[in-house]
Amino acid sequence: MTSKPPWMALAVGAAAIGGYYFLPSRGQSIAYVVIGVGSLGCFLAGVRLNVPDRLRLGWYVFAAGFALEVVGDAVGSFYELFLNREPPTPGLTDVLYLGGYPFLVVGAILLVQRVRNTLNHTVLYDTLAVFLAVTLVQWVFFIDRYNHAGVTDRGVRLVDMAYPAMDVILLVALGQLLVRYARNFAFQSLLVGVGLLVAADEIYAMKTLSYGTPRWLDLFYLGSYVALGVAALDASAGKIEPVVVGDVPRLARGRLALRGAALLTPPGVLLAEEAAGHRVHMSIGIFGVAIALVVMLRFVELFRDADRARAAEAAVRRESETAQQLLAVQNQRLRELDTLKDEFLSSVSHELRTPLTSIQGYVELLREDEGNAMKRGYLDIIERNSERLLGLVADVLFAARVLEGQLRFEFQPVDVGMLAHQAVEEARPRATRAGIELMSHDGAALQVDGEPARLSQLLDNLVSNAIKFTPSGGRVEVRTSGAEGFVRIEVSDTGVGLSAADRDHLFERFFRSQTALERQIQGTGLGLYISRAIVEAHGGRIGVTSVEGEGTTFLVELPARA
Amino acid sequence: MNDRPYVICADDDRDILSLVALRLERSGFDVATANDGEEALELARARRPVVVVLDVMMPRLNGVELVKTLRADAALGDVKIILLSARAQDTDVARGLDAGADAYLVKPFKYTELAEEIERLTA
């Protein structure tokens, strides 16, 4: 969600600062306090408006520091307006100003903790390095100079030195804000506010030594107030959220530059002091050693992190290798099981066929020798049933292979018309026995690419089914024709027909239609399952239309030979 | 010794072996029977047959191995061989024919099928 930054408040603040410079001295004293109080009011109102309860602590601590600064201003103005003199130094104003700094710093750090709420080693070491470098600069250029400036009053000297000293921590807070930079208006405005405050203090520290505070410096202080007030007024103040960063140890370029700058500060300061002809401080050496130590600690940390990451990576790699080996073993076992199952199917087939061979062979022999017609009839029955058993064995094994996806066909040009004719002629004795009229209508040469044995099996299945489900006196017709790249086979009967519910499941494995069960028509429920598998293996399709009580038509379409 | 064509049958299933032998004798062949591949090989080496009818799954020396042995034999390399097996898959048939068998019949078989094959091979 994006909302407009509080441009209005910013504009009013800017106008007030502009107006400030057109006022007479006494008016300026009042306006200065008014702008400060107004900004503080905006800040508090903004916090109440935009920042959720749980995040308010940092903002309020910061506001306390802000308030102390504004009260300090008010006390100063009071002296100017009513006592017609500058406030005494050291005095109440100094206590208020200097007392406000710790609150500003702690508040800023609390705010920043929201941005990245883990205080890890990286942040700690980097902050320490920056802190040491800033302190060194501050000490040499801003604080220590008061010792040699000829200010005789000890209290005045201490207070003058306290401001740049406070700026050290404020600068560190500013550094924290910069390091954890968040991309939203409230944060940016806060940064500008703290930045202006630090800059104003630094300039003030330098100027007081030379020729007093210039009026233009008020622009910095007042600008800082307005920026802080506006920061809290923006809706994004409640959303200074943690920035997501990876945990991988890395050498971020910005941080590297920061550490480099910290390391280079002591020699830089040394050179500057040397050039200015000042006495060289021992403090430069001490700070140099401290900064180098901190940066080194940071690098040790970095290398340790890298080692840890490498070790973790190696562990993961070992784990994945183990998993791969396990997978390979399991695959091997699966392949073995597959082979075992294949072998089992073959054995079962072999073991079932072997006794059937003897039965059929001896029955055949007996029947040839048998003179008694009645006994020959019995032998016919045995033969017919062993045939059925053999068909069943073949169907079960075939269905098992379909299920395994192991059907392997060798295609050759086949005349479907001729196969249909053969299937009809083979079925004719059965049809005649059942009192059914069997007719075939063959089209012209109808060539497909297929396996003759399987297509014969398909035709035989369909014709046998039609005969099985047609009562005596009925008719079964087999019609083959060619059309639009397809060879069509229609097998229709005037049988019992199928219900809609049965039609839906007809081609499923082991499915038996209700009529088949009611009329106790024999079958395993494999015929049509196998038929569909054969048709699909030939790239064709099979369907059925039926009217209950009137008959059924199976329609097969196979792609014609190109 | 007689002038009837000499045929060797090998099968570890004695019922089937008797059936095939009986059928072939009735058809006018001189038939010797073996219960395994080794026996069949000995018989063939003792007297060269016109045709051998072999089961595939036999102990000691199986049908396919026997076919290879016979084909590699200088004296018996061109003997006609029919494999007769309950192993009915395409791969089984292909393995038998690749080994050098002249024909592969799947059990159960009609005797007329076997008779036709023998006639075709000995013509």
Image (cartoon, grey):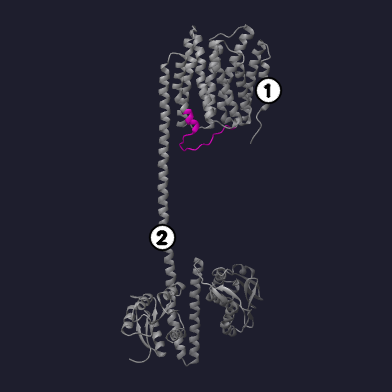
Q: Check chain identity for marks 2 and 1: say if they share one.
A: yes
For mark 1, what is the residue? A12
Give the crowd class for mark 2: few <14, some 14-19, many >=20 residues within 10 Å: few
Taking the view exactly as shown, the residue that stands out farthest to the front is A275
Q: As rendered, which of A513 and B75 lies closer to the eye?
A: B75
- The residue that appears at 42% across and 65% down in the rendered structure is A339
Q: Position of residue A456 (x, y in %)?
A: 55, 77
- The residue that appears at 57% across and 10% down in the rendered structure is A212
**Amino acid type, label 2:** Arg
Residue A115 quadrant: top right
Give, as a single range, the part of the protein colored magenta. Answer: A239-259
Give the crowd class for mark 1: few <14, some 14-19, many >=20 residues within 10 Å: few
Q: Position of residue A358 (x, y in %)?
A: 42, 82
Residue B58 quadrant: bottom left
Quadrant where the image shows the N terminus of chain B:
bottom left
Relative to residue A450, is residue B57 drawn left or right?
A: left
Q: As rendered, which of B37 and A77 lies closer to the eye?
A: B37
Relative to residue A448, is residue B37 drawn left or right?
A: left
Labels 2, 1: front one = 1
Q: Chain of mark 2?
A: A
Q: Does A186 sit above or below residue A471?
A: above
Precedes in sequence: disc 2 or disc 1: 1
**Amino acid type, label 1:** Val
Numbered mark located on residue A333 in the image: 2
Q: Is residue A401 visible?
A: yes
